[in-house]
Amino acid sequence: MNNAKEFSNLNLTKEMLHNLNEIGYTKMSDIQEQSLPFILDGKDVIAQAKTGSGKTAAFGIGLLHKLQVKKFRVQALILCPTRELSDQVARELRVLARFSHNIKILTLCGGVAFGPQLGSLRHGAHIIVGTPGRILKHLKKDTLSLEDVDTLVLDEADRMLDMGFSEEINEVLEFVPKNRQTLLFSATYTDEILDISKSIQNGAIHVKTTSTEIANKIEERFYEVNNADKIKTVIDILSNFRPQNVIIFANTKVEVDEIAKRLQESKVDALAIHGDLEQYDRNDVLVQFANKSCPVLVATDVAARGLDIKELSMVINYDLPHSLETYTHRIGRTARAGAEGLAFTLYSAYEEEKVDEYKNDNRIFESSKTLKTVSGFVMKPQNITLVIEGGKKDKVRAGDILGALTGEAGLSGSSIGKIDIYDRQSYVAIEASKIDEAHDKLKSGKIKGKKFSVWIL
């Protein structure tokens, strides 16, 4: 059984096996063991795998194994969300490719000069690694041909979608032969990822490195509390459990506004959403919560419909929900995809009878006095959102914004979060400590050669 993870069990050349041994690849990681047999068999694979899982070697060994070195044409294309990841992938591929001379791997990313890339492309390449925006630019200028590509890899596909690259990816796909192997790697399996898999892959084999997935593992706690102490209890919950993000549900619009206001006064960054908001205000709020520019969202049930947050740490029911069904629906927003979640519900002494129907062996009922009060607690966002007064109608793409920020503005890709592009506006999440720098550089610079108004939300 211990030999199952040996690379020598795979149908690889002696030269490749020797190189893997030389570079210290003695045993396969879980993702390699589960996906490589299918990849080497030419099958399409969709794999859930995080950075550090060994996924680059999984697709790298697969595409290098079938590469025809004497055919000096682009045979594999790897799309990545950022320049940093593209460089990292290309570095690892070069090490894996040492078993053979003359394998040329080229990176094409935004944020760097276009000219030198043209020069490199004229000399030809076997494998291209890069960001969707820059690759599309080369394709449209006819400086890159993908007609001989037989392996397409989407690496960190969920991050590419977060950064607003779905349109660019679809356009790049039009230049890639239909008869190809497509490998899709993502840290999360969202509906959007599964939809993309269905549209670009054929009979894809699903590989998950998490061997056992427990559906919605939620710790549920109920606190009896006086109305006058409710806000204090919410702050005590936040300061004791320190969630990354939380939705607080209330039963009325008036209550939602009041809770958000009082949390803000207590140095907890919170936004309110309910049916009375105009569409553009609703967009502003949802974008900020989804891109980690606001850690706390206070909402009514109706306003939260259609809200898709992949990783939600906590749900708080400020009031006892009207029904058990509503309760289940609310707390089911946390602990998705095998993660763990927390759910808290506040109720008053007058609701003792209604609370009885919630009691079971898994739910914890205790006094709010068991929560410690943490002095000086503040809750600030990880990111802050920049708004650019330009969008789809102005032909602004995620790649253009990313290029402007990582190029002339000099920000690293890791400081840039989710990019949302609407018809006339674009929203970009920027690491909080870099927001002023990003704002100043974009304000004085250009995107796609044009000047746009830029402001901090």
Image: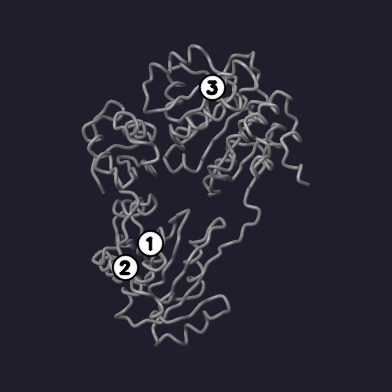
- Of residues 122 and 25, which is closer to you in this image? 25
Q: Which residue is mark 2?
A: 256
What is the CA distance from the residue labelled 2 to the residue labelled 3?
A: 54 Å
Q: Which residue is mark 3?
A: 105
- Image point 35% across, 51% down: which residue? 382
User: Up-down: is 147 above or below 375?
Assistant: above
CB under 8 Å between discs 1 and 2: yes
The amino acid marked with disc number 1 is Ala
**Residue 214 locus on image (x, y percent):** 61, 61
Nearer-N-terminus badge (2/3): 3
User: Up-down: is 336 above or below 44?
Assistant: below
> Crowdedness of circle 1 by 10 Å Cα count: few (<14), some, many (20+)?
some
Q: Which residue is mark 1?
A: 303
**Residue 3 locus on image (x, y percent):** 76, 42
What is the secondary structure assignment of the residue under circle 1? loop
The amino acid marked with disc number 3 is Ile
- Image point 71% across, 35% down: which residue? 7
> Crowdedness of circle 3 by 10 Å Cα count: few (<14), some, many (20+)?
some
> Crowdedness of circle 2 by 10 Å Cα count: few (<14), some, many (20+)?
many
- Of residues 44 and 410, which is closer to you in this image? 410
Nearer-N-terminus badge (3/1): 3
Q: Residue 162 lies in what quarter of the image?
A: top left
What is the CA distance from the residue labelled 1 to the residue labelled 2?
A: 11 Å
- Image point 61% across, 22% down: which residue? 98
